[in-house]
Image: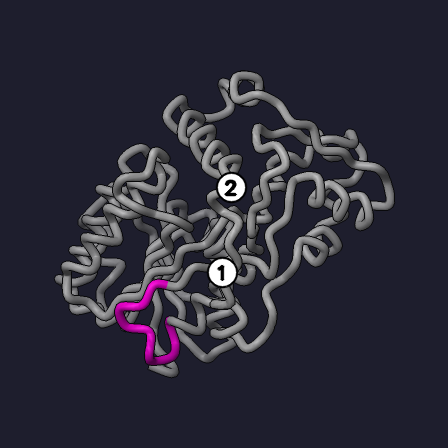
Amino acid sequence: MNTPTVLVTGATGTVGSALVPALRARGATVRAMVRDAGRAVPGVENVVADLNDPRAVATAVQGVDAVFLNSPSAQDAAALQIRFADLARDAGVSRLVLLSQYAARVDSPVRFLRWHAEVEAHVRRLGLDHTVLRPNLYMQALLGFAGTIAQGWFAAPIGDAAVSVIDTRDIAETAAVVLTTSGHTGRTYTLTGPRAVTHGQIAQALSTATGREITFQEVPDEQFAAALTGLMPPWQLDGLVEDYAHYARGEAAEVYSCVADLTGRPARDITDFARDHAAMFAQT
């Protein structure tokens, strides 16, 4: 499996767009699955398919050695991923790497964690060579706050709870290792940054990187939700509020060494992310 052909779902997304070059750097042949032919990934084979279209998915998985299964932003995400996994098995795919979420469990009060746990359980029953990756909160989620950060502040209902946030580049590089090396069958890797940080510490890292004062403001759930109403579907907004309640309870602070263990180098710190993305938080 050192030079496999790998199908990457969500190839233009935050993780997928970093995974494609990481796989190529390791000698893999990449097939990028995209929903829009106009957004083809350069330098690799592209296949146009949507998880809602089982016939297109069945075509996309033909002839690949491994697949990276990302979660779509959809209310029926679990059902779509389960059907994809079944189609991959039927096509004879020998390895599946599933992108799940930190602390996924079937009895979680957080809907997204329940959905991920459901998919994990189904994949385990399929008998495929599979590996589960459970990343914590993405550092890149801060890019969604870029507008207010450019004005010198950002807000969330999390208080001073610490979260072991992870850079999506580390998720991608870890996934590339798992997809191209042996010894990962049946394993679940929880992926975090090198330390847990509060949003106040994140604000300080952004301040240092941009050279201007950026502050974090605690807001209640209702105010947070009201500010995002209309920007995403209600189910997604409700799930996001549940996610932040999970963080605020201190349930996402544990640090794991999986990134360093698998890639051979330390996971990126929030200061690394802030430095590398400082221009995206520039004043407008």
Horizontal arrangement in the rendering, residue 98 relative to residue 272 (left or right): left
Location of residue 10 with respect to 215 vertically, above or below: below
Which amino acid type is shown beneath numbered disc 2? Gly
Is 182 part of what is drawn in magenta?
yes
Q: Residue at x 33, y 79 (%)?
A: 183
- Disc marking residue 171: 1
Secondary structure beneath disc 1?
A: helix
- Quadrant showing the N terminus: bottom left
Which amino acid type is shown beneath numbered disc 1? Ile
Residue 246: x and y in percent read 45, 37
Select label 1 or label 2 by which is in front: 2
Location of residue 139 with respect to 23 vertically, above or below: above
Residue at the spot of label 2 = 250
The answer to whether residue 149 shows anywhere in this view is: yes
Residue 66: x and y in percent read 30, 69
Q: Residue at x 29, y 40 (%)?
A: 114
Q: Which of the two discs, 1 and 2, labels the residue nearer the N terminus?
A: 1
What span is in magenta? 179-188
Q: Residue at x 86, y 40 (%)?
A: 212
